[in-house]
Amino acid sequence: MTVATHGKGLYPFTREVETWLRKQDAANGLLTLFVQHTSCSLVIQENADPDVTLDMRDFFEKLVPEHGEGFRHTAEGPDDMTSHIRSALTHVSITIPVINREMGLGTWQGLYVFEHRARPHHRRVIVQFMGE
């Protein structure tokens, strides 16, 4: 699965995963998502209030400032090493139970690619279901 990003922020892709899961005729088991990049991550976050995703983005900007001193790895720009640090602080894989043909997400939970780079990217997410 590919998720297009347009700079830093959280990009929802719950619906795409739900569509994929329906095509697998999955009933009960575990769904694993894995992003194949080191400068973005996967998160489960509130999907009702868009301010949550904006606050998450802003918090990580403060936590790991782009113009910090002392980073050696800046080959792809000032957001290079900071993106790797932000990715290490979050997750590159998520496991979700599938119960009665649906992801076991809570009412307000959604799946997001958390893009840590300023430039647009196409992020590859491996989606795998194990179960019946």
Image (cartoon, rainbow, N blue to C red):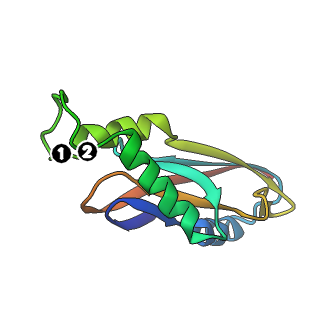
Q: Position of residue 4 (x, y in %)?
A: 38, 68
Q: Position of residue 33 (x, y in %)?
A: 57, 49
Please identify the residue farthest to the right as the structure is shown.
100
Residue nearest the viewer, comparing 5 with 72: 72
Determine the residue positioned at 81% across, 64% down. 101
Label 1, secondary structure: give it: loop
Q: Position of residue 85 (x, y in %)?
A: 36, 35
Q: Is disc 1 surrounded by few (<14), some (14 to 19) or many (20+) residues within 10 Å?
A: some
Q: Is disc 2 surrounded by few (<14), some (14 to 19) or many (20+) residues within 10 Å?
A: some
Task: Residue under label 1, please give it.
Answer: 78
Determine the residue positioned at 30% across, 40% down. 82
Q: Is residue 90 left or right of residue 130?
A: left
Asked if the residue at tag 2 contacts the one at tag 1, i.e. Cβ–Cβ closer than 8 Å, the answer is yes
Task: Residue under label 2, please give it.
Answer: 66
Residue nearest the viewer, comparing 1 with 132: 1
Q: Is residue 80 above or below residue 119?
A: above
Residue at mark 1 to residue at mark 2: CA–CA distance? 6 Å
Q: Is residue 36 visible?
A: no
Q: Is residue 128 visible?
A: yes
Residue 18 numbered tag: none
Q: Is residue 28 left or right of residue 39?
A: right
Among numbered discs 1 and 2, the one appearing first in the sequence:
2
Determine the residue positioned at 47% across, 65% down. 11
